[in-house]
Amino acid sequence: YLNGVSTLDMVMVQRHILGSQTFDLKYKYIAADANNDGKVTASDLTDLRKLILGISTRLPNKSWRFPLKDAEVKLSPLEFDENNKIYSLAIDHLNEDVVAVKVGDVNGSAVVSINGTVVEPRSAQNLNLVVNAKNVDKGEVVEIPVYSSNFSAVSGFQYTMNLKGASFVGINGGAIEMNTSNVGVLSGDVLTMSYANDEAVSANEGDVLFTLVVKADQATNVSEILSLTSDVTRAESYNGDLKVGGVSLSVRTAPVASIELFQNEPNPFKGQTTVM
């Protein structure tokens, strides 16, 4: 079910629903109808997000649909024919054909053969998320603000986050709207996250994008708690042109204060002096 499905597809569905970039192919409507109710609505986004986050392993609909090639696809409500009646085998039927549509895969990135590879427009941009290093005590509930050094024209991102020595408590939005619906808690130490917006969003380097709230299971440092992987949900980001880039997490440590020696008093001195 997850073949070809990512947060990028959610961005495209959002744009279509809000009318900023409607689908240009009738088969995209079929792909976007994740719950098979004959409409493309926010409820389809909910089912797609659960699949992407690993909360669900399948969609309410079939994984693939096979509308007859060149047959009419009615859009409101969504109707199409997947059955072709052949009344006689006395003549050849060499022109009979169907179109394979992967449900949830609006941008057509599904791998369709054993040796196939994902083909998507790629961007050299790597979205860098940043947190500050901080010592935490065992049992402490700590808020971890998440920043970015290059959050420019971002339409969405997704990743798997591993927690070491801590457990997830909650998440608060900031410069971008994030809540528990954007998070999949798969186990005590594995989270998945997905963010999608119909418009590309930018934020300054000092802006808090969102805040993670965790409880430390042991005395540790924020730098040891968080790490990003693609173990469940693939780590990637999407720019305003819907090109796919990477996403990473770095930890910012506080600068070490330098030692500066000023004039001693009194000077000259006998017996003792004060050094500042």
Image (cartoon, rainbow, N blue to C red):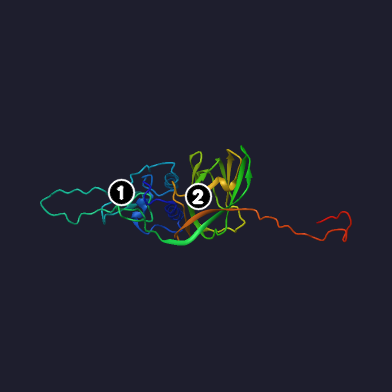
Q: Nearer the viewer, mark 1 or mark 2?
A: 2
Q: Secondary structure at mark 2?
A: strand
Q: Position of residue 136 (x, y in %)?
A: 63, 43
Residue positioned most to the left: 90
Q: Residue furthest front?
A: 271
Amino acid at dot 2: Leu
Which mark is first along the chain, 2 or 1? 1
* Residue that badge 2 annotates: 228
Determine the CA span between mark 1 and mark 2.
34 Å
Q: Position of residue 275 (x, y in %)?
A: 82, 56
Side of 193 relative to 255 (left or right): left
Classify residue 203 as left or right of residue 263: left
Please tell me which residue is depicted at 45% across the width and 45% down the height of the picture. Answer: 53
Crowding at dot 1, Cα within 10 Å, few <14 / some 14-19 / many 20+, comes out as some
Between residues 208 and 177, which one lies in front from this camera angle?
208
In the picture, which quadrant includes the C terminus? bottom right
Residue that mark 1 sits on: 65
Q: Position of residue 119 (x, y in %)?
A: 37, 58
